[in-house]
Image (cartoon, grey):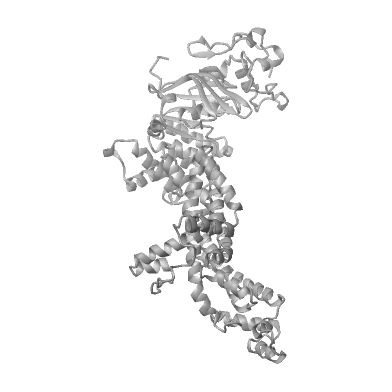
Amino acid sequence: MSAPEPILSMRDYRLVFDTFDGIYQALDGVGFDLNPGESLGIVGETGCGKSITAKSILGLLPSPPARVLSGEILYRGQDLLKASERDFRRLRGTEIAMIFQDPMTYLNPVFTVGEQLVDAILAHQRAKPGGERMNKAAAKRHAIQMLAKVHLPNPERQFTSYPHELSGGMRQRVLIAMSLSGAPRLLIADEPTTALDVTIQAQILDLIAELIDDLNLSVLMISHDLGVVAKVCDRVIVMYAGHVVEDAPVDQLFNDPRHPYTRGLLASIPHPGRPPTSLSGIPGTLPNLYDPPRGCRFAARCPLAVPACTTAVPEKRHLSGNHLVACIRADEDLPAEAADA
Amino acid sequence: MLLFLLRRSLFMVGMLFALLIITFVISHVAPGDPAALAAGPDASAEMIETIRKEHGLDKPLPQQFLIYVGGVLQGDFGNSIHTGREVVDDLVRFFPATFELVLASILFAILLGVPLGVLSAVKQNTWIDHVTRVFSVSGVGVPMFWLGLMLQLFFALQLGWFPLGGQLDMMTDPPAPITHLYTVDSILRGQFDVTLEALRHLVLPALSLCFPALASIIRVNRAEMLETLNQDYITNARAQGISPLRIVGLYALKNAMLPTLAMIGLRFGWMLGGTVLVETVFDWPGVGLYAVQTAVSSDFEPIMAVTVLLGFCFMVANFVIDIVYGWLDPRVRGTT
């Protein structure tokens, strides 16, 4: 791949939470680039720091307790870690938009769908120069257009509905419509289908894929579900306990995962053709991030671990063109009993 | 919405009837013979019997009750056994003063309590929050009459900023009645000097009466705001670029107001009861003071009337709150 200027670039991002129990070292040196028009997936298990990474980009983490130790998050050259709340408001919705995990709780229960949509649209308008702003009537027309665009049946009628009158899938469509109504360049989708029924999941994923093409969006898709990522994304980064452990194009990651954690993650996907007895997980649990291990955070669970793994955090290195991995033994094969899964 | 109102109104009629039964029974099984008290210590048995007959107290209780309810339905609350005056006339005379006092108190409690609760939540763990919290915790515990006395001592006697009691100065004529509320009437009549005077008289009693309500409104509103501001829909609103002021003042407050409203309704009831104490301390010519004066002489009809009236006010207030609740929260509209 040639090297266009990335639209979003996170470098050596370290974030901790100050809590009563101590300092929780949530993200440790997270870095990746997202190129314009690209869909990048972030996968990893619950607690690995995916959502925190996403929320950091929009400045949505409450601080305190969140505290940035180092790094930069560059959006089209602007460092978001130095942005004020005012700067963020200019970006939110109009440059960078976000859709969230649980559509049931992300809409305000005491306002109609229409009121919330129009309010969001008017907020987006405020980021624009005076002459181009919509008035309320235009905002309403735009809102109904957006509802139609996300294939919500009866957009005019749903405009006056309250969230509790809609199903989960419909609410997620409303939230997607709201997020995209400001014509953002970058969409962050934080587990957008996790809370939905499987059939609805597929519909919403199709919709997101359609809108990505349609609106020429750059996308950061967060999920713990590799299937979701495979469907929508061009490239994937795998996170484990606040580290990025692997970064590769989707095909390459699925066909030739190199980090032992990624290999374990892929092996744990149940396959219809395989007997259920061989369903395998990764033994062990996440490290304690109040007092994280010094070296590779996966070392304690890793079948390939050697003493060197516990002394220093492995550097990310290129295996082939754009396949990066943070493991000193990424070229090795897994020991037999771990590999047969 | 119409059905909601209708159902609520019917419910209120039932409540009112229940209230009538309870007040009637309690006042009639209470010890003490009103006829004997009214007749005086030297009255003969015959005289007492005459008074008893005159007031219908010799009839069996259920019949007395029916007669009473029949009267109430026609707006007749009977006569005071002591003064002989019609209770309704007394209520018309005293109630507006109480209504004015309670209205001022509840407005004060809401207009001050809600913003302070919001401020305390938004500035959580700053000195503003700490001061407000100390104030609101101690406020709930302070007895009204004691607070009233302290306010009198300090602001009336020491500083002389406000009058000690009463609704107007002795020499001032009340404005010609329109609403019977002195502050409102004097404005309507253009007598602004009287308005000012009425307001000055209102400050200390209203402050004592509203204090516990104010404190608990702040507390509830603060807690609810903190909770609401942590909700996902607030995160989404922020992600949409909606301004913080709008998020706090509209998105969060509308949700936080629901439990606060319930608290306001409850506190309104306490306030009505509190008028008995505060009106006594401030010599405020309202039904609270009237209730005290009639209670010490076992004068049934006025006591029952005051009880029913205050109970009715409480119901109306909560009826209004239910309506506001339904307006704020679309989820309850179809259900209640």
**Quarter that holds the N terminus of chain A:** top left
Mark yes or no: residue A214 visible: no
Instruction: From this view, report whether residue B229 is shown above or below residue A42.
Output: below
Query: In the image, residue B257 lies at what x, y percent?
Result: 51, 51
Out of B168 and A312, give the one closest to the viewer.
Answer: B168
What count of labels does the image hold?
0
Query: In the image, residue B304 lies at what x, y percent?
Result: 61, 75
Out of B276 and B59, give the one closest to the viewer.
Answer: B276
Mark yes or no: residue A267 visible: yes
Question: B327 left or right of B193?
Answer: right
**Quarter that holds the C terminus of chain A:** top right
Query: In the image, residue B325 lies at what x, y percent?
Result: 52, 57
Instruction: From this view, report whether residue A200 is shown above or below residue A304.
Output: below
Instruction: From this view, report whether residue A40 is shown above or below residue A305.
Output: below
Query: In the image, residue A32 lies at what x, y percent?
Result: 48, 19
Out of A223 and B222, give the one closest to the viewer.
Answer: B222
Q: In the figure, residue A48 lies in which quadrant?
A: top right
Q: Residue furthest left?
A: A131
Instruction: From this view, report whether residue B70 is shown above or below residue A39.
Output: below
